[in-house]
Amino acid sequence: MDLRTPTLWTPMPTSTPTPSTEYVLGTGSDEATRLGLQHRLWSAATHLLWERAKVQPGQTVLDVGCGPGHASLDLAQIVGPTGRVVAIDESATFLKQLHDQAISRRHHNIERVLGDVQDLLAVLADDAGMIDIAYARWVFCFVPRPEDVVKGLATLVKPGGRVAVQDYFNYERCLTLAPRREAFSKVISAVGASWRARGGDTDIMGRLPTMFTQHGFRIEDLNVVQRIARPGDSLWHWPNSFWQTFLPRLVEHGFITPEDRAAFDNAWRDASQDPASFIQLPPVFELIAVRD
């Protein structure tokens, strides 16, 4: 379980302002905990996607933007000791968490790779044409150069191999609290604006099918998972954990005011205490593309 790192990295000139490359939600322990909850609450849909993508024992699977590796650990169990999981992320902190979990669970078939998913070939050149399945969940929506990720996958995935993606489309319009509250809607708009300011796209799945077909893939499957949550549901804690992690960042970077945050907190608290309230969660679109 050695950690591979890029052999060459050329920094941008110091005179050129560039956005922070840190994951927009951070890499602290609070975010790692949130990601663990998120993975567990979405694991049923994820495993169904992997079944449709035909993940099997003995395969080589690439986990694109693996984070702390919750999906990587599950995939390692599926591909088994004769298979291999290549987990790539730009956060050494997250990869260390994956290492610790893999050791404790005795998964010896996970290879951690430190690198930018937008430059896959910089760190995975030896794996060209070797990947059976690539998987990316909520990665494309955050990266400024999503087509570069697709280009890299077009080289890494073997002919007949598949890429399975879970990501967003129509995020800001669909993420709605019922009854509607203006304070809530204002913050959701700010969430989208903050992602776009860093080069992200909350509607990325609307563009991905074209990107994949233009780079030698055939779209085999398109699907959407739409869920709602009510106070008291386990799923209610998914958006709640997101507010706790991300809203302070929105205030810090000026996307909302402290007063906006207070109004949102009041609206969310009222909804959490109202058994008639519910939240329509952002729809998660699923894509399976086959390499021709």
Image (cartoon, rainbow, N blue to C red):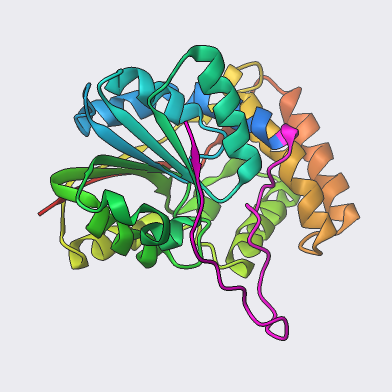
Residue 207, quarter of picture: bottom left
Residue appearing at x 75%, y 35% in the figure: 268
Is residue 35 rendered to the left or right of residue 221? right
Is residue 158 rendered to the left or right of residue 264? left
Asked whether the viewer can see residue 221, the reply is no
- 82 versus 115 height, above or below: above
Residue appearing at x 63%, y 69% in the figure: 197
Residue 22 x/y as whole percent: 66, 56
Residue 38 x/y as whole percent: 56, 29
Residue appearing at x 29%, y 25% in the figure: 48
- 47 versus 209 height, above or below: above
Asked whether the viewer can see residue 97, the reply is yes
Nearest the eye: 147 or 49: 147
Quadrant assignment for the C terminus: bottom left
Nearest the eye: 135 or 101: 101
Residue 222 x/y as whole percent: 24, 44
Is residue 75 rendered to the left or right of residue 29? left
Magenta region:
1-30
